[in-house]
Amino acid sequence: MRLKDSFIHPILIALCAEEGRQPPPSLQLLPTELKLLCLRNLQARDLAALGCVSRDLRHLATSDILWEALFVAEFGAPSPSDGLLRVTGGFKPAFAFRWAERARHRRQRRRVAHLPGMFQPGTGPHLVVPQHHFPAGAIGGDFDRLPHPFLGFSGTRGGSGGSALFGGAGFGSSGSRRPRWTGLS
Amino acid sequence: MCSVILRSSDGADHVVSQEAASLSKTVQSLLEELEAAKDGEESILIVPLPNVCDCTLRKVLQYCIQHTMSAQQVTEGPTPSDELKKREMEAWDRDYIMVSTDELYHLVMAAHYLNVPGLLELCCEGIANLIRGKSPEHVRQCFGLVKDFEAPEEESIRCTNLWALVDEKEQAKK
């Protein structure tokens, strides 16, 4: 059976195409609603790959009915307020957008995990920063979002004006920051 | 239990129990019509199915009989092995759907025409399994499709789907 599928069937199709005859009954001859029913069982990645096969399949594999279900399963129901669907113009682009966003987040997290101790506050003695070094209003801002101020520090060394990133108030200028860090370690 | 005869497009008769035949909604409604029309005559009902060929009908009936049997076993009384039976049935389904592509095509058409929801679902899952994990090129080969995109169109399609294709490459590396 596998031999028939993987070997004889493609040859038969190729032969029919060469002789200009109708190919043997195969899945592309199924009515649209049955095709949709089949594609409903597929995951996003397979559906996206299927969209690259032919025009006919692309039309099917980008249908919002399929992608809406996938979107809801993967990211939950979209809120009408965020306008994601309006901006991207459909469930498939919206899915792709969210997917890329999540992949980026994961990559970032992995990068942090690859440097053990470096970016995790309080894991090494050289990274213990007294609380009063942070500006009072920093909680909930970039201090919470970024893994560690060390990131920002390396950025300021390039002189790109990154000191604004942390509000600057508790840190002073970037020039005075360096000795303070080295003193801590 | 009452038996009925299902006649395929090539004229072959299949005798099955009414219960098994009733898994197909189409046959069920045809039977009801015939029953109403027969006026108490004691004869076996014959249901002509001109859209289904003999070998496909045989395969469909195999499914119907197996599923009626397992349903009967379940209704006889809940046993601790219910879960086991369910798993057995799933395994049977998996084996059942291991057919070649064109057989699957005929089967899905028959399941659609005969309106057997479970079988239709099973077939669709089978077809999805054929597509799953294949690259666009591979899918084209398997189903005899031609690439009907222009070169720039193909490039733009590839770009919009890059998120899925790139991820695949990453997974392959792992």
Image (cartoon, rainbow, N blue to C red):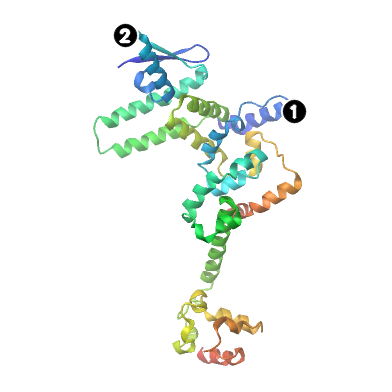
Label 2: chain?
Answer: B
* Label drawn at residue B40: 2
Q: What element does badge 2 sit on?
A: loop
Q: Where is residue B15 shown, x and y percent of the image?
A: 40, 14
Residue at 67%, 50% (x, y): give it: B158
B58 left or right of B155 in image: left
Residue position marked by numbered label 1 in the rendering: A18
Q: Quadrant of the C terminus of chain B?
A: bottom right
Residue A76 seen by the camera: yes
Mark 1–mark 2 Cα distance, whole angstroms, equals: 58 Å
Residue at 50%, 79% (x, y): give it: A143
Q: Is residue A16 above or below residue A155?
A: above
B78 left or right of A173 in image: left
Q: Where is residue B5 shown, x and y percent of the image?
A: 41, 13
Image mark count: 2
Q: Is residue B122 above or below residue B44?
A: below
Is A71 or B34 nearer to us in this picture? B34
In the image, which is nearer the foreground, mark 1 or mark 2? 2
Quadrant in the rendering for residue B142: top right
A55 left or right of B76 in image: right
Circle 1: residue type: Glu
Label 1: chain?
Answer: A
* Label drawn at residue A10: none
Q: Is residue B47 above or below residue A13?
A: above
Q: What element does badge 1 sit on?
A: helix
Q: Where is residue B157 shown, x and y percent of the image?
A: 68, 49
Q: Are marks 1 and 2 on the same chain?
A: no
Residue at 66%, 82% (x, y): give it: A160
